[in-house]
Amino acid sequence: MFDQIFKSFEGIHAAVVGDVMLDTYWWGDTNRISPEAPVPVVAVKGKEYRIGGAGNVALNLRSLGARVSMHTVTGTDEDGLLLEIMMKEKGIDTTSVWKSDDRLTTNKIRIISRNQHLLRLDYEVADDLEPVKEQRFIDKTLAAFEADPPQVVIFEDYNKGVLTEKVINQVLGWCRQRGILTAVDPKKRHFFSYQGVDIFKPNLKEAKDALNLPDINTTAEGMLDVHRQLYKRLQHRFSLVTLSEKGVFYTDGNEPHLIPAHVRSIADVSGAGDTVIAVAALAFAATHDLHLAAEMANLAGGLVCEEVGTVAIDAGRLQEECYRLLTDDRSSSQLIDG
């Protein structure tokens, strides 16, 4: 069954719209405290660059075999050039990556010693796109969609200014009119802007903060109430809420479902949400089975947390885990569309 599902990913064009960034890691040893201030001295042994933000969603989709196009805005700086080169090397279509001379490419620099995250430096401009450039980005994105329609569009919002209210409304509206599957990993600034999206995937804290709830009961009924409150504002199709060590919750508003997390040796949760939205959206596009998509995304999110830093899911390992941990007696013909 899973052989056919993973094979079907290769026939899907997935478009990612949102805030791309460069993840930089400085690795080194720490053996003493600085004489200048009570801080550790890190003897840097190496640097590593990874594709982050919305780019990590695209990277996860490519790792699963999908054809992926990236729709974003970067700066004209060296970081933006490096990101574009890295994405092309991974087979991500960067035709619709637009460079703006008045923006910095977001670069998150992490300093790590002995697998411990000591410090992060953020180099970025997070202002919304200016109106003229905002419209140019919309036009460029929709023209690309018209020329090569995607089967699924994922909005990956990191509050860095690409996903403005207007961008969201026009791109999402275009997708709704054409029946294209949409999914979003939201952030607080535009949390309730994704009207009518198919899959709405916040994490528990984001949902709690957006709804101004003092606490959330993570039972099935408690989470169903969260979905109902979200639905009043969004009129979306499905809620998929990540619950950290408790797993994931999903519903279409009728039956609530809690999927527990599998026991893992957690090293780093960075980028896990990117993996979850990528796997969930792609698996649902292929199978139209939200339960299976949520199960697979839950597995994938746990697997990437075993690695230090932002990493994409290993398709082979995920497939092995699906066979080992997921049971389903339905035939593959029922699961794969067409």
Image (tube, grey):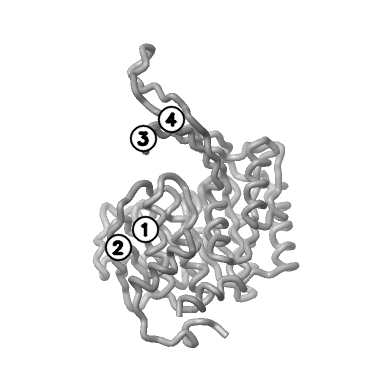
Res 302 label: 1
* Disc 2 residue type (three-letter): His
Q: Which residue is mark 3?
A: 114
Indicate which disc, 4 or 1, sits on the residue closer to the N terminus: 4
Label 2 neighbour load within 10 Å: few <14, some 14-19, many 20+:
some
Left or right of 141: which side holds 121? left
Vertical relation: 313 (above or below) 119? below
Q: CA distance from mark 1 to mark 2?
A: 7 Å
Quadrant of residue 116 within the rendered picture: top left
Which of labels 4 and 2 is toward the front?
A: 4
Give the residue at mark 2: 262
Q: Position of residue 108 (x, y in %)?
A: 51, 38
Q: CA distance from mark 4 to mark 3?
A: 8 Å
The answer to whether the residue labelled 4 contacts the one labelled 2, judged by CB atoms less than 8 Å apart, is: no
Task: Name the residue nearer the viewer: 292 or 210.
Answer: 292
Please tell me whether mark 3 sits on a helix, a strand or a loop. loop
- Dot 1: within a 10 Å radius of its alpha carbon, few (fewer than 14), some, or many (20 or more) residues? many
- Answer with mark 3 or mark 2, whichever residue precedes in sequence: 3
Identify the residue at image location x=24%, y=66%: 219
Residue at point 63% right, 47% down?
A: 86
What residue is shown with label 4? 28
Residue type at mark 1: give it: Gly
Callout 2: SS? loop
Residue at the far top in the pictured view: 35
Label 4 and label 1: CA atoms lie apart by: 26 Å
Q: Secondary structure at mark 1?
A: helix
User: What's the CA distance linking mark 3 and mark 2?
Assistant: 26 Å
